[in-house]
């Protein structure tokens, strides 16, 4: 096997105990020196004297750093690094020889004859890579080499979920990577010894979405059974005091009292709730009541809530006054040019210059799903980038199913279709109704170029200009 000489191996990761000790020290300093406000990522970077990439490694607990880095991070908060605070990394994605680590020094340099998983992958030929390729139609698996981190998002959610009674709201248009991020958040939580419950709200019967009492009982039953606890809902639910108060007492006095470790409860695809805005408003009010009551109750602090939804559905609903402003809001952005280039290299493409990256991004922007679909076809369907672009511009090509979904939405919303027609046909700066602008941006159909509103990418401009012309909208502009 080829040896990779001189490669620096960062081989130490925090233990759950080490992470808890560091997080506790950070929290204490925030309360004392920052008026209780959380340090921003930039403030932490400066204080610890490390890069944001290193912070991402630190919080992940599955990517190693060296001992000097750990000492810097701990000493920044008046802590001395202990042997119980870290462990030597030994995981499939970082196959390394750690026996030569000397934990008495300040800097860890490990030269191993064994290449890392990444090195093995990048240097594989096309025949070997084919075993890793599958059509990208869902979340990126935990062991996949095709996941692209988007700092500072990962470290923000990892850190937030360790805080008592935390709430995280993850929103983005469809196919932007929400489910892939949640998989990693759940894996991180499990490494801390937390209980995890991951509920896909599309599995909840429609009849429950129109009755708040039934919905709250359903959610409580699901959490209890996932934790291996007998729900005993009838014994601990008093409808005479109202379902919202019953729900809070059930969590406080029964469910969370039976567990010692935190419980991370993920509500995936709450989009279906938004179709019933009255119930949704009351449900989110229940979340707020838990969030506020948890400040003074140790049992309620064990619950960590993660809500995931698509802006494509939320934007249509009249629930703008619902309490979505609690906790940490996370909005997933597109890939940068560097991230697209990195992903192309992971696919075995030798895009040493930025020319191919720029051409692909001029077609689809940095949209994660569209980029991955393009790379998939380039790698395993034996088509060229020129052919891919030509076919996509002509009739949607490999992206036609993605485009059809957006087209069906515009057909159902003629007023919005007319507004979008102005965007795809006008070269000069245009002004749109703020509500229309918000909806088009939430759908992922537009972006800002300075102060100009432009189509999200060339693919959208050419495809929707052609499609909208069939509705006789463009001719009237």
Image (cartoon, rainbow, N blue to C red):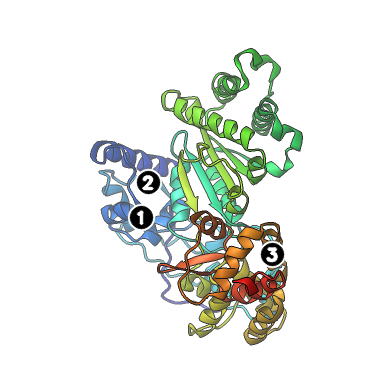
* Front: mark 3 or 1: 3
- Measured in 3D between alpha carbons, the distance from the residue under mark 3 to the one under mark 1, in whole angstroms, is 59 Å
Of label 1 and label 2, which has the lower sequence position? 2
Q: Nearer the viewer, residue 361 or 107?
A: 361
- Residue 201 coordinates in the image, percent (x, y): 68, 42
Q: Say whether residue 282 is visible.
A: yes
Of label 3 and label 1, which has the lower sequence position? 1
Q: Give residue 474's mark.
A: none
Q: Nearer the viewer, residue 372 or 453?
A: 453
The residue that appears at 63% across and 50% down in the rendered structure is: 313
Q: Is residue 93 left or right of residue 68?
A: right
- Residue 151 coordinates in the image, percent (x, y): 44, 59
- Above or below — where is 77 with respect to 358? above
Q: Say whether residue 95 is visible.
A: no
The residue labelled by disc 1 is 103
Q: Give residue 83's mark.
A: 2
- Measured in 3D between alpha carbons, the distance from the residue under mark 3 to the one under mark 2, in whole angstroms, is 58 Å
Give the class, few, some or many, for how many residues have Cα within 10 Å of label 1's Cα (few <14, many ≥20).
few
Q: Give residue 407's mark.
A: 3
Quarter of the image containing the N terminus?
bottom right
Which of the 4 image quadrants contains residue 259? top right
Which of the 4 image quadrants contains residue 227? top right
- Above or below — where is 6 with respect to 160? below
Q: Is residue 192 left or right of residue 47?
A: right
Give the class, few, some or many, for how many residues have Cα within 10 Å of label 3's Cα (few <14, many ≥20).
some
Q: Nearer the viewer, residue 409 or 45?
A: 409
Quarter of the image containing the C terminus?
bottom right
Which of the 4 image quadrants contains residue 55? bottom left
């Amino acid at each position: 096997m080829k040896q990779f000489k001189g490669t620096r191996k960062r081989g130490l990761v925090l233990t759950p105990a080490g992470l808890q000790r560091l997080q506790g020290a950070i929290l204490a300093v925030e309360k004392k020196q920052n008026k209780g406000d959380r340090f921003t990522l930039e403030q932490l970077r400066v204080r610890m004297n490390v890069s944001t990439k290193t912070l991402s490694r630190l919080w992940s607990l599955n990517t190693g750093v060296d001992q000097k880095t750990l000492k810097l991070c701990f000493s920044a908060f008046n802590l001395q690094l202990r042997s119980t605070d870290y462990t030597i990394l030994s995981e499939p994605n970082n196959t390394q020889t750690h026996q030569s680590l000397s934990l008495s020094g300040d800097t860890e340099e490990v030269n191993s004859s064994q290449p890392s998983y990444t090195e093995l992958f990048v240097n594989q030929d096309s025949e070997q890579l084919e075993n890793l390729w599958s059509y990208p139609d869902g979340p990126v698996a935990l062991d996949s080499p095709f996941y692209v981190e988007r700092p500072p998002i990962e470290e923000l959610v990892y850190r937030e979920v360790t805080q008592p009674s935390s709430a995280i709201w993850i929103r983005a248009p469809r196919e932007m990577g929400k489910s892939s991020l949640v998989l990693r958040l759940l894996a991180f939580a499990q490494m801390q010894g937390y209980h995890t419950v991951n509920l896909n709200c599309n599995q909840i019967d429609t009849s429950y979405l129109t009755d708040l009492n039934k919905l709250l009982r359903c959610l409580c039953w699901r959490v209890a059974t996932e934790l291996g606890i007998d729900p005993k809902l009838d014994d601990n639910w008093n409808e005479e005091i109202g379902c919202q108060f019953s729900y809070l007492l059930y969590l406080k006095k029964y469910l969370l009292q039976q567990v010692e470790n935190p419980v991370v409860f993920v509500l995936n695809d709450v989009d279906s709730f938004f179709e019933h805005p009255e119930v949704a408003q009351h449900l989110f009010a229940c979340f707020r009541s838990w969030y506020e009551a948890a400040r003074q109750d140790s049992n309620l602090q064990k619950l960590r809530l993660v809500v995931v939804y698509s802006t494509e559905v939320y934007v249509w609903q009249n629930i703008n006054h619902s309490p979505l402003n609690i906790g940490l809001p996370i909005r997933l952005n597109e890939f940068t040019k560097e991230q697209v280039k990195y992903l192309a290299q992971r696919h075995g493409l030798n895009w040493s210059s930025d020319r191919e990256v720029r051409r692909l991004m001029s077609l689809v922007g940095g949209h994660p799903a569209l980029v991955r679909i393009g790379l998939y076809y380039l790698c395993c369907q034996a088509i060229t980038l020129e052919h891919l672009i030509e076919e996509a511009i002509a009739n949607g090509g490999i992206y036609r199913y993605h485009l059809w979904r957006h087209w069906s939405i515009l057909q159902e919303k003629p007023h919005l279709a007319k507004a979008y027609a102005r965007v795809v046909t006008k070269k000069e700066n245009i002004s749109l109704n703020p509500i229309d602008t918000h909806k088009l941006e939430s759908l992922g159909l537009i972006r800002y170029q300075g102060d100009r509103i432009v189509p999200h990418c060339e693919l959208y401009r050419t495809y929707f200009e052609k499609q909208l012309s069939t509705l006789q909208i463009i001719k009237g502009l």
